[in-house]
Amino acid sequence: MLVGRESESDALDRMLAGVRAGGSGVLVLRGEAGIGKTALLDRVAERAAGLRVARVAGVESEMDLGFAGLHQLLAPFLDGMQRLPAARRDALGAAFGLAGAAPDRFLVGLATLALLGEAAAGSGVLCVIDDAQWLDRVSCDTLGFVARRLRSDGLGMVFAVRDDEPRADPLDGLPELVVGALPDAAALELLAASAGHPVAPRVGARIVAETGGNPLALREFGAELTAAEASGAVPLTEPLRFSRRLQERYRSRVRALPRAARLFLVLAAADRTGEPGRIWRAAAKLGIDPEAEPVPATDRLLTWEPRIRFRHPLMRSAAYYAAPAAARRRAHEALAAVIDPRLDPDRRAWHLAAAASGPDEDVAAELARAADRARGRGAWAGAAAFLERAAALTPDPARRAERLLDAADVRWMAGDAVAVRALLRAATSEPADSGARARVRRLEGLTLFAAGKFAAATPVLFDAAARLGPHDARLAWDTTLDAVNAAYCAGPARARRLLRRLPAPDQPGLLPLATAAPLLYDDAARRELEDAGVPGLRARGALATLLGALLALAGIQVQEGRLADAEATVAEGRALSEAAGLRAYLGLFAVVDLEILAWRGEEAAARALGARLIRDLTAAGHGLGAHLARGALARLEAGLGNYAAVGPVAPDHDTVLALVEAQARGGRAALEALAPLAVAAGTPAALGRLALGRALAAADQAAEAHYRLAVGHLRAARHTPMLARAHQLYGEWLRRQRRRREAREQLDTACRLLADLGLAALAERARAELRATGARAPKRSVDTRDALTAQEARIARMAGEGATNAEIAARLFISPSTVEYHLRKVFRKLGVTSRVRLALALRDRPGSPPAAGGAVGR
């Protein structure tokens, strides 16, 4: 399987094209063992249709057999020897042992060039030479001589040479192509294909890092990777242990070293910092003299400045596992002994754990303390690793179960649902009290939710909340909110009933990040979510909770008309969902995309996406997602005036407005059913929606008071699109009442608000209504600058808000150089030269939210 080698393949294809056209080409592929040079040679040979292909591979054991490689390569063409001039024919015959005289190497080279040139005259020839560093020297000299003298001969030569062996000097100066590590995406693809099952992102990232993106290592390790290891349920070894065949490629170099050098390599492999002072102090504890043999003996395997590093990651694994287990434990013990527990307690704890030969509560407790410190930093994956190792070293079964549960909690915060399930299985095999069993139940419900099984998760989470009550009141409340969230995803109607019956929590704080704030239009919670909640969760790396918060935030941004901000939030949420394996959120983030299209009035795109989402989400049992998608389409059609296409849908407050506006079946009844929730919320946004719905449903003589109330409430909220709609609908009603002057005032305000928000279809509807009153509609705002792509807009907004390139890259899962590339394009398109001016330019672009306001009218 050849992946991630597009540029190398293109270079070889260009060389082949030149040979087919009657020219010649030479290319030397250089790279480490297993990097994929042979795979590229296989590909170029397969694509050499119409050419005669000759292949040879150097063999280390035959390096002393003069002309052995050349004879093998030229064997298909030897029938042409008789047509060579006598001196060249004799020289080549002597080289191949057909004559007794010593061969003239210059004549051998000329004979080889002539023999290959004659063969190429018919259909072209491609010579493929693998492991050229192991060709016998005279063969390599001869082929280098030929390669430098190719002209328009229809002859191509491709060599592959290992970097980690003495260079094949005769090839120096020929055109080279360095074959490096696979790009991360291609490496992960190859790993998953070799494993035969999905590989969790964090597991794949570690394997790619420790193999250095080496395809051979990825294939070998992937083939031995169990499903449990691939998912992250079973931790990988430290360092990674590769297959015996791969290890043997490197171990032979280790075993050839003196004892002190081998022991020094184990120390270097056991210590990931590479800090020279620490390694040498540990070496002294093992009796290794720094003035003796380790340095010269290991020069080909290690680099020394500024830190001690293995020249290839696979050498680290080979050096570590070539040593007996007892020697590895001694190395870790020596490293722990030289680490100051005040300066680096976590690393010391880890080495103590690696030095332990059996259960040890003192070491386990030290690891648990290290986990607490990691949690305090928001390093969830590190905390989980400490806790899992602590559990393995814990002698007491009940305490072992408690630490496994702590690890499962932390893995959940890191967004690793697969590892949570494995840890729960391990924890439930140990004795546990009722509090621990309640925690197990909670995590079972959360993993069901992460898998998208919302209906199944709901009763499990409510049961867990009830069990947690006597042990942890705050966790019981949070679990209840998780249950409501699961119920809301399964179908919103039941969640609303449950939410209204919930008691107030005993402790204050940011409560229902993903549920109650959107349902109740809790503006204070919304502000806290954006200003503190999401940044705090992002900084702590609490991925599972962050995803719910991002989803809520994106919905808030849409309701406030900040559509570009919502797109950036969706991009971050989608990237995190895929990276963490919590794919249940992907459908909901796609619904936010649909909401954005609906508000912008992009009919074709919205209808196509909506139909696909309704189909896919319904099939997946994602009741909330399907409901929200139907609601977004209903609002699209109502906004465009296509009332016949509206409904029936399960209503929420925003969808109810579409139903009532379209006079769709059940709209008025649904409005009054939701009225108690709006009154209970008591926020301007909720009350404004209720008043607008009642205005649409009321008889003419009662409507105006509701319209005025709606506009008044919505002016106090930040929901500018809904405010603009209230002005628009009020203006349309006034025009129907033949109150043209007042209608113009409302419709003019609606036009300006909708245009400023970039809601073109709704703005055009308001302009048409305004023209119908006899007024001149305001001109459409035209931005003469180039439009930003969605990715450019996301990056520009983050940069305008003060985020650094590195911070933007981390949030969008791209490289800082990619961020810089997009920002250069943004600056050019917007005509700015600084981030300060960028923020100002973005503020003035259509689609940036205006200040809420507008005329209320009489």
Image: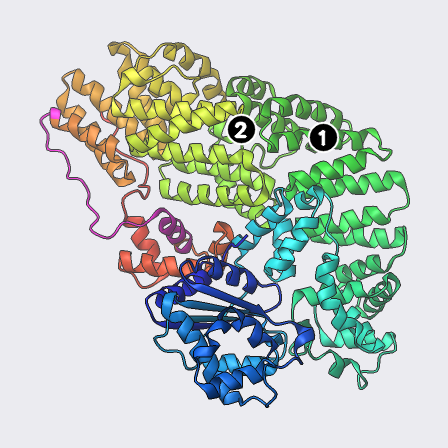
Disc 2 target residue: 516
Q: Which mark is residue 473?
A: 1
Q: Residue 846's spot in the image, x, y percent?
A: 27, 44
Q: Nearer the viewer, residue 708 or 251?
A: 251
User: What element does badge 1 sit on?
Assistant: helix
Q: How far is mark 1 from mark 2, CA to CA?
A: 19 Å
Q: Is residue 165 left or right of residue 117?
A: right
Q: Residue at x 80, y 37 (%)?
A: 427
User: What element does badge 2 sit on?
Assistant: helix
- Type of amino acid under label 1: Ala
Q: Is residue 379 above or below residue 605?
A: below
Does the magenta portion include 788? yes
Q: Residue at x 45, y 61 (%)?
A: 9
Region in magenta: 772-799
The answer to which of marks 1 and 2 sits earlier in the sequence is 1
Asked which quadrant contains residue 725, the reply is top left
Q: Residues within 10 Å of mark 1 (few under 14, many from 20)?
A: some
Q: Nearer the viewer, residue 829 or 691?
A: 829
Q: Residue 176's spot in the image, x, y percent?
A: 47, 74
